[in-house]
Amino acid sequence: GIQVEQSPPDLILQEGANSTLRCNFSDSVNNLQWFHQNPWGQLINLFYIPSGTKQNGRLSATTVATERYSLLYISSSQTTDSGVYFCAVDSLGSNYKLTFGKGTLLTVNP
Amino acid sequence: DAGVTQSPTHLIKTRGQQVTLRCSPKSGHDTVSWYQQALGQGPQFIFQYYEEEERQRGNFPDRFSGHQFPNYSSELNVNALLLGDSALYLCASSLVGGKEGYTFGSGTRLTVV
């Protein structure tokens, strides 16, 4: 099945700093999403981005499908950005399920 | 517009018991998927339901079963609970084929003692 690798596994920032999270995947995808999992466990959808670039406030994402990677940018980080960020994909051969990476644990200190 | 609703939020069961978790999809969505998330891991796909049928199943034993109702809501049943079934169970809804992405509920945290 498709493999999803996220980096870095852990990231500690001071409030106001910028960061880039990376997601590499091993096959062509039908769907790619970035999620933020809050301390209560809910997965909040940040972007549905199988290709191209999108922006939402301080967050933006870029997926280069031909090179099989996606980037999530967080600018002017806030303590409320803390949590685990997951990249999830479904491959063209199996668009019934999402395969998740192991996540990036982001800690933003005041 | 209501999102994905899951119940209950927390549950404690004894080994060997059976449990049923429930999910109501986001309005307009017709497909429901279930995921298991162990502590410190990413969610793992259990199965997906569309038109009241199981479309695809992940690497989970037959103790895990499900159902989708005509109103698109779904249940996840787990029989003969093991300590290792303790996890966060997440429901996701979508349009068929995952078009426009998946929306997740807040999950049910199951503890097996």
Image (cartoon, rainbow, N blue to C red):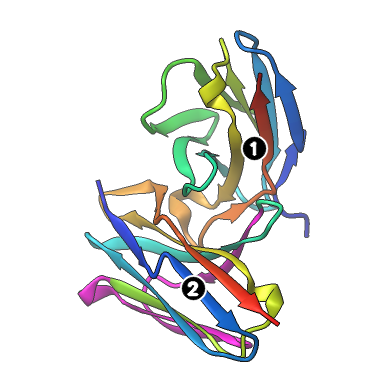
Mark 1 on the same chain as mark 2: no
Q: Position of residue B63 (x, y in %)?
A: 49, 15
Q: Residue at x 47, y 49 (%)?
A: B42
Q: Which residues are magenta?
A: A42-68
Task: Classify residue A26 by image quadrant.
Answer: bottom left
Is residue A12 inside the magenta stretch? no
Is residue A58 inside the magenta stretch? yes
**With respect to residue B66, does B107 lie above or below?**
below
Looking at the rendered image, the quarter that the N terminus of chain A falls into is top left
- Left or right of residue B74, residue B3 in this image: right
Q: Position of residue B74 (x, y in %)?
A: 64, 32
Q: Position of residue B81 (x, y in %)?
A: 57, 15
Work out whether residue A26 or residue B66 is closer to the camera in this orientation and state it.
A26
**With respect to residue B75, does A15 lie above or below?**
below
- Residue bearing the label numbered 2: A11
- Residue bearing the label numbered 1: B72
Q: Residue at x 53, y 89 (%)?
A: A18
Q: Position of residue B105 (x, y in %)?
A: 67, 49
Mark nearest the camera among 1 and 2 is 2
Q: Main secondary structure of the magenta part?
A: strand
